[in-house]
Image (spheres, rainbow, N blue to C red):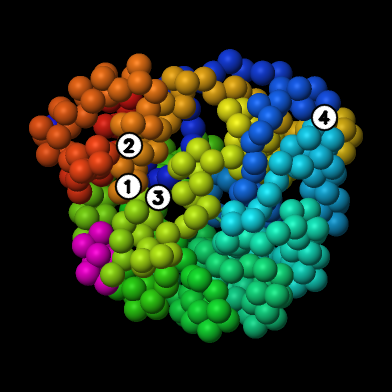
Amino acid sequence: MEPHLQRGALTPGPPSTAGGSGPALPTQLSPSDAAKHLADGETKIRHLYLHLPFCKRICPYCDFSTAVGAGADVPGFLKTLGREAELLGEAAVLCQLEPGGGTLYLGGGTPSWFGTGVLADLLAWVVSLAGGEWAEATLEMNPEHADPDRLRVLRSGGITRLSLGAQSLDLTVLRKLGRVHSPREVCDAARAARAGGFSVSVDLMFAVPGQEHAGWRADVDGIVGLEPDHISLYNLTYEPGTPFTRWLGTGRLQVLDDDWQAEAYTWAVERLRAAGYERYEVSNFARPGHASLHNQAYWNHDAYLGMGPSAHSLLGRVRTANLFHLKQWSEAVMEEGRLPWASVERLDELVLARERVLLGLRTTRGLAITALPARYRQEVVRGAEELVGMDLAVWTEDRALVLTDRGVLLADELAARIAP
Ligand code: SF4
């Protein structure tokens, strides 16, 4: 098998069931019904995600749950978020939230789109909701929002880490992506965030139509020069229903092929390694001690609670996904008075094992065979030995399977191949 870059292989998503799922549970649950289903009981939730679904404008490649912020009913949104928390309280979920040493992540959308007053109120509300101290509290920020007042409010509100949606330092690429910020604003934002005492992560995107290798390399060099603590590399993917996907169909855009992408990624990995960034997951690189704790919680199958439209939760062995659209989410909570779940599934042992394989192979810690239920190990080891024989993976001393640089380009495909 010749490694090529598998489409989407470099794009991490929330954990998803790898080829199957456990029994689905009813989704239209009242708080008391939900409590019965979630009575796995002892689960402590140390990780909280809030989805804040507003942006200045919608980028043509984006399929996240978000809406144009101008004219949005922000007080109404915050009220709905508060009511969702109350419903989770009535369902005996919120009482399991114990943030001590855990993580908070404010994603979206563009959380930094909110003004300082709203951000201050929101962060104070999170403190009242969860209490305790987070080991890591991240907010996704667009570069144009890194002004001194916002940074001050975020720092005093408990945010410790900023994830900057830079995407590129090339103005042509930024405009093609529909981004409104300039390369200069990326640099200023990274410096201001560092000076403000935040741990800084930067997102970069490659395989943007029209992008050239020289431009991509200049992007990586430029971001390394800003000395962030953490860098995420994403290849552009074409999601159903987005303008970019439509434009592919009409010939307005052309995909940069797998070989282009593999070369771009492989070059970036070497460049980042030379600059002291360790790859700890296919798309994520960090200076020692700066790997994202929140991401790792997802990959470890730790319990987490998500609130807001489209947010997922893992509560013991029950995974829930909130309604995707702001309006539906809001109606479920405010008008129907129910938890805004679009799906609820109880994950069985097989599904969890498959996810462990999928997620484990994306990380450089690897897939710990002993973490799999005994009845699946033999089958997985057989497949793993084949990968080792093809130089796509190696065993570590403590019996974890780790993909080689060649194997990483096929991570998801290889996981599907050896999963039980
Ligand atoms: S800023 Fe981010 S969340 Fe908002 S539309 Fe663009 S890609 Fe999507």
Residue at image mark 1: 365
Mark on residue 368?
Answer: 2
Q: Kindly indicate whether the residue at mark 1 contacts the one at mark 4 (C-beta within 8 angstroms).
A: no
Mark 3 secondary-structure assignment: loop
Mark 2 secondary-structure assignment: strand
Q: Which quadrant, please, contains the N terminus?
A: top left
| x, y percent for residue 410 | 26, 38
Instruction: Name which residue type carries label 4.
Output: Pro
Residue at image mark 4: 31
| Closer to us: 326 or 78 | 78
| Closer to us: 145 or 201 | 201
Of the two numbered discs 3 and 4 on the same chain, state the one appearing first in sequence.
4
Camera-nearest label, 3 or 4: 4
Mark 1 secondary-structure assignment: loop
Magenta segment: does it hold 415? no
C-alpha span from label 2 to label 3: 30 Å
Of the two numbered discs 2 and 4 on the same chain, state the one appearing first in sequence.
4
Mark 4 secondary-structure assignment: helix
Q: Main secondary structure of the magenta part?
A: helix
In this rendering, the answer to whether 366 lies above or below 208 is above
Quadrant containing ligand 1: bottom right
C-alpha span from label 1 to label 3: 25 Å
Instruction: Name which residue type carries label 2.
Output: Ala
Q: Is residue 240 left or right of residue 160?
A: left
Distance from mark 3 CB to nearest ligand 1 atom below 8 Å: no
Is there any visible trace of residue 295 in the rendered image?
yes
Mark on residue 236?
Answer: 3
| x, y percent for residue 248 | 40, 42
Q: Kindly indicate whether the residue at mark 2 contacts the one at mark 1 (C-beta within 8 angstroms).
A: yes
Q: Classify 10 Å Cα crowding around label 4: few (below 14), some (14-19), many (20 and above).
A: some
C-alpha span from label 1 to label 2: 8 Å
C-alpha span from label 3 to label 4: 39 Å
